[in-house]
């Protein structure tokens, strides 16, 4: 089993608009090291995998972010993908 650390992302002190925070998380995910392996014990794919240089983890997060129904739900989602500072 591969254990991958979530990328770190500083959100404190930023504009609290949820779309701004989501964009900051997306940047952190795009800059994170890539691996072809996936974490076997979690559904959220912390081990980023790629398909023709396209980061599927970034697309997965963005799709889920757009489906969030509240500010709190979106923040919880962000914490699943990155270590929030």
Image: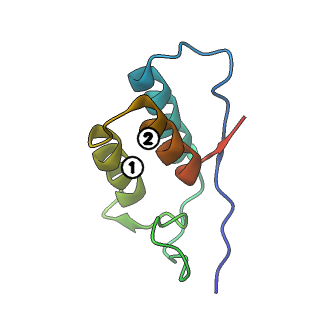
39 vs 23: above or below: below
Residue under numbered circle 1: 61
In the image, farthest residue toward the bottom: 1
x%, y% of residue 18?
A: 43, 24
Colour treatment of the image: rainbow
The residue closer to the viewer here, 44 or 73, is: 73
Earlier sequence position, callout 2 versus callout 1: 1
Q: Residues within 10 Å of mark 2 (few under 14, many from 20)?
A: few
x%, y% of residue 50?
A: 39, 65
Q: Viewed as shown, does residue 67 lie left or right of 15?
A: left
Label 2 and label 1: CA atoms lie apart by 13 Å
Q: Residue at x 48, y 67 (%)?
A: 45
Q: Residue at x 64, y 87 (%)?
A: 1
Q: Residue at x 28, y 39 (%)?
A: 66
Q: Nearer the viewer, mark 2 or mark 1?
A: 2
The numbered dot on residue 45 is none
Task: Place residue 14 in its image quadrant.
Answer: top right
The numbered dot on residue 73 is 2
Q: Residues within 10 Å of mark 1 (few under 14, many from 20)?
A: many
Q: Secondary structure at mark 1?
A: helix
Quarter holding the C terminus is top right
x%, y% of residue 57?
A: 41, 57
Q: Residue at x 68, y 22 (%)?
A: 12
């Amino acid at each position: 089993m591969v254990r991958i650390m979530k990328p770190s992302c500083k959100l404190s002190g930023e504009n609290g608009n949820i779309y701004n925070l989501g964009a900051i998380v997306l940047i952190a995910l795009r800059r994170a090291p890539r691996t072809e392996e996936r974490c076997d014990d979690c559904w959220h794919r912390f081990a980023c995998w790629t398909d023709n240089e396209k980061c599927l983890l970034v697309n997965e997060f963005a799709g889920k972010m757009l489906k969030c129904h509240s500010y709190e739900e979106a923040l919880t989602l962000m914490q699943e993908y990155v270590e929030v500072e």
